[in-house]
Structure formats: structure tokens, C-alpha cells
Image (cartoon, grey):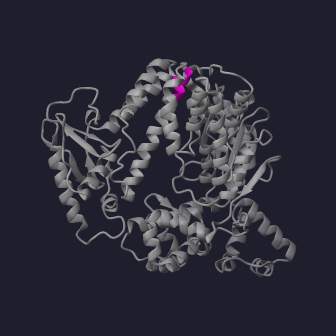
Amino acid sequence: MIRPPARPAPAGTVYFSLLGPLSAVRDGRPLPLGPRKQRLVLATLLARPNTPVPVDVLTDAVWPDDPPRTARKNLQVYVSAARALLGSTGDDGRDRVVHGCGGYRLTIDEGELDTLRFRSLARAGRAAGERGDLRTAARLMREALDLWEGPPLNDLRDSTGVAEEAERLEARCLTVYEDWAETEIELGRAAVAVDGLRDLVERHPLRERLRVAWMNSLHQSGRQAEALAVYDDYRQLLARELGLEPSPAMAALYRAMLGRGRTARPAVAGREAAHGTALPAAPRDFTGRREELRELLALLGSPDERVVVVSGPAGSGKSALALRAAHLLGDGFPDGRFHVQVRQEDGSARTPAEVLVELGRLCGVRVPAESSETAATAQAAVPAGPERGPAAAAVSQGAADAWQRWLALHRALIVLDDVPDEAFVRGLLPRSGPSSVVLTARGQLAGLAPVHRIALGALADGEALELLGKLIGPGRLRTDPAAALRIVRACGALPLAVGVGGMRLAVLRHLPLAEYADRLGDPSAALDELVAGDISVRLRMASGWQDLSADDRRALGRLAGPAQEGGFTLDGAMEALGCGERAAIRTVESLIDAGGGGGGGRGGRGCTPPQALREREVLL
């Protein structure tokens, strides 16, 4: 059943539902939506309301593997049918579906689409919760969840494109359900959430936040044995499927339940702890790095490890690994998980004072403002470029003390992304307290101690091929596996380069893999091929090049020839550098420490694309 919008719509208005099977009603009567391909087009447009949808996206939704030559003409027919069904908008009778340079755009109001109404109610509910009005929050979120009829678009999920949109919608519904369940538990009404949480855990067994809410609801309902069994089942499932343990917060909850009877869960003022998260979206195409992820999760779950450095050359997947871990840790950091980008869009580093101000804003820390004279003096002490002086001088003592006081009293996870050097972050790292910090950096930040380090190398061939397949589709990958392998190897198995190449191939649907592999094999033009929209491998590599000292730049340029062959021996490095053994070793070690030499990870394999080392435009 499709529930009508909250506010009455004019007679004749069509109301669409995506939070279940694709459906539509007009004046209470179901509407036929046409053949399957027409419904796929309509579902894709409705999943991205009021936003241009590229023609390629619509094509992929309807013909995921082999679109016919008449695909565009067929799309026009399906869009025409959608226009007829939707009718016009506004008093001027404009079409709801219009075509522009960005693709087809569908204009639709909140009262005509369940996902828009869902989003509006969920936002209002969260805002009420943040004000401390938990009853209103629970009511509004329940109204939103009443629109959720089951797996979104479950009748069209055999289309990869529609399935991705459906999974995004379902993830949004799950998050709101978790918010609602936690609110009901805080209100002392845990029993109303028990059955729904059980059903969702059965469908999403690895979603820890659902499990925690289910444990709490059972426990607060007086069903302690069942609550403990939820944890035991989850622990065994994680160990069997992923080789992981539940988060420290969930383990602590389990131990607390073992040691006490039924108690009320303490309310969180303003629900700050439940929503103290400022992380970019989890990387959807995260691939490989199983050992590194397990190690990072274990380190961040340990009470003894407060700082972890994830290092590797530009494009090696440092940020993706850090964010993957931050999202998986969930309730392990009840005072929040926060991500701050240390560099600006052009690759230059921000000042430590700017980063600390952003941290203060995210974490609710009142950072004392610097006087203009102090700020100017501090900034003058920080020369530009890789030879700059102590960056920490740009942080006032009062601001640093306020930040350290907050860290000492809270358990939060801070991700500082793309750190330029040790001096930049020394004043931002916790001196005491339970908070943890993950630093991603091109160099290994050898001047920081004691910290734990995880160095990332290239992906294995199989992992790189898996990543490419996620972007271009496994069917297309199988059409020419030899060419696919040439592509990932030409990219040095760098996640960034493989990802950009995959995104480019996803747009150039009719380009044979062998032809693209040939293009990447031309050192003079390879980086021209590794561009997708506003993402460019050349720009990322150039940014890393600018961070190197003059000596390291010269050395890396001389080692470009041997690197083209996939690596070099000590004798080859000595010959290229024109120096003795010890000097060659020190030079290569300096490059590895600075992140310019692709020192490699567990397998010892470097990860700088050979073409990047050969191209003078990047190096000079």
C-alpha cells in the first residue's frame, strides 16, 4: 500500500513510491507504469529527483551490458512516456522532464514522491532530537519509517544501476531506523523496537549499529539472555566471515550487561553523542587492504594506541582505508568521529591554526581566537614549500591547551587527512586521554614517536582487477582479461589510477579494453588518459612532486628510467644516481620516507605508475 503525502495534493496529482516496489497512484487508483525498460528509466529519474541524470546513467540502467545502436532513440521514447504520465508542472504548463547539457532532469515536489517526504520527516526528527525533544523526534522519524514498505525498488534490482540507487535508499532508511530505535530506547520504550530490529538484523547481519540497538532493546525489555546471545552470534559471524572482532564499544556494552540487571539507558543531552560524526561517505569501491584494515581496526580498538600513521604515495588509497575503518568503528568512539582535510584543493597545506579551528567547530571546542598580530607573526614563521619551518608555531598556546583539554576528557576518533609533515601535527595529537588520531601522509612522518605505522603499497593484480571490475562491470572485464591486466599494471596497481581509468572506461562504453591498454602504454600520453571529469592523476602526482625537496626531485628524476622497468636493483640505483653504495641507499631511503619512492606495503611492491615517472611534465 502506498501512503499518501502528509499535505493534500491537488486532484489528479500522481504520487510515486520508491520505498518498496516502484508504484504510482492518482486519486487513490494505481497507475500502470508500462513495460520493464520504461519503468527502469522512470525509477532512475525518480531516484535522483530535481537533478540532471546523464544519458549514460539511464543507458546503463536499461542495458547494463550491451546497449543496442538505437539505445538513445529508445530512451527518448521511454522519456516521452514518462512525460505523459507525469504531466506538466506549474501554471505555465512546463514539462516535468526536460533535457539539458547534464542529461534529463525530473522536477517533482515533496508531496509527490515518498523519498522526498521521507527525507523531510527524517531531517525534522533529527533536528528535534538535537534540541532534546526526544518525543517529537521519535514521532517524526516513525512517520518517515511508515513510508518504508520494504527493500526499495525490489522489483527492478536485476538492473545494476537501479540496484545501486536502491541500496543507497535502503541505507538511508536503515540509518533513520537506527536513530528512531535509539530514541525510543532513551525514552524507556524499548519494547516497541524489538521485533523490527530483529527483522532488520536478519537482513543486514553485519550492521553493528543495528545489533547494538537490538541488544539494548532486548536488555531494557528484561530479556537479558537474548541480548547476550545477540552479541555472541555477532562475534562468531564476524570471526567466521571477516576475521574481525566486535568494536570495543559493543564489547564494553556486553561486559556491562553481564555485570548488571535491567537498567535504564542514560539519555544523551541534545543527542550529541549519537550524531557526533563528521565523515565523508564511506568509499563504495573500497577493494583489498584486508590485512591493513584488520590491523588498523585492532590498533584503534586498543586502549594503548592513540596515534596511527597510514603512509603511502599519492593515490595509494590512504584516505579510503582510514575512512573505511572510521565508518566500521561506529560506536567505538561515543564522543564522535571527525575527518579534516589538511590540504587545500590546489594541494597546498592549510595552516595548523585553520585546521584547529575546524576541529574545534566539529567537536564543539571553544578555541580561543588569536590576535591578528600573533597570527601574522606565526604565519611569517612558516615558509612555503617543503623547506618550511615549524608549522606548529601557527597555533596559539591558548588554542592548543583548549584542544588538549577536550581530548583528555573525550573518546573521539580524529582523521587528519594528507598531513604534510611532523611539525604540522605535533600540537594536534593527544597528550593524554582516550581519543585516537589517524594520520594519512605521503611520507612516513619518521619524526613522530611513539606511533604505529601502516605503509600501503600497490594492490595485488587480483585486487586491482576487482576494483576495475566494480567500475566497468564484471561482464566487460571478462571480454578481454589480458587487456584488463595490462591496464591495471600500466596504472602501477594504484587505486587512484585504476579507479580513474575505470571511471573513464565506464563513460567510454564502446572503447575496447585493448585499445585503452595501448593508450596507457604510451609514456608520452598515458596521464592524458587518466582523467575522469575533475579527477586527474597528473594533478595528484604533481602535488606530491611539489612536496619533495630539490635533492629528492633530482634523484627521482634520475631513477625514472629504471623504474620504467618495474623497479631497480642497488647497482641500477648507483648507476642512475652516479654515486656509491651508501649514498644510493640513503637517497632511496629518503625518497621512501618522503613518499616519493613508492616504498611498498606488505608485499614490498612499489606503487608509482611508471608513466608518471617518465613524464617530464610531472617531474619538471
Q: Is residue 432 above or below residue 106?
A: above
Residue at coordinates 70% horizontally, 50% vertically from top-left?
A: 296
Q: Position of residue 313 (x, y in %)?
A: 66, 61
Q: Nearer the viewer, residue 109 or 588?
A: 109
> Most prominent secondary structure in the magenta stretch?
helix
Q: Is residue 85 above or below residue 462?
A: above
Residue at coordinates 47% horizontally, 78% vertically from top-left?
A: 480
Residue 182 is a magenta residue: yes
Residue 37 is a magenta residue: no
Name which quarter of the figure residue 466 lies in: bottom right
Relative to residue 240, is residue 271 drawn left or right? Answer: left
Relative to residue 261, is residue 2 drawn left or right? Answer: left
Relative to residue 409, is residue 174 drawn left or right? Answer: left
Q: Is residue 382 visible?
A: no
In the rendered view of the protein, which quadrant contains the N terminus? top left
Give the magenta part as a residue range.
181-186
Q: Is residue 168 above or below residue 544?
A: above
Name which quarter of the figure residue 143 lies in: top left
Q: Is residue 515 visible?
A: yes
Residue at coordinates 42% horizontally, 30% vertically from top-left?
A: 123
Residue at coordinates 26% horizontally, 51% vertically from top-left?
A: 42
In the rendered view of the protein, which quadrant contains the C terminus? bottom right
Q: Position of residue 57 (x, y in %)?
A: 34, 58
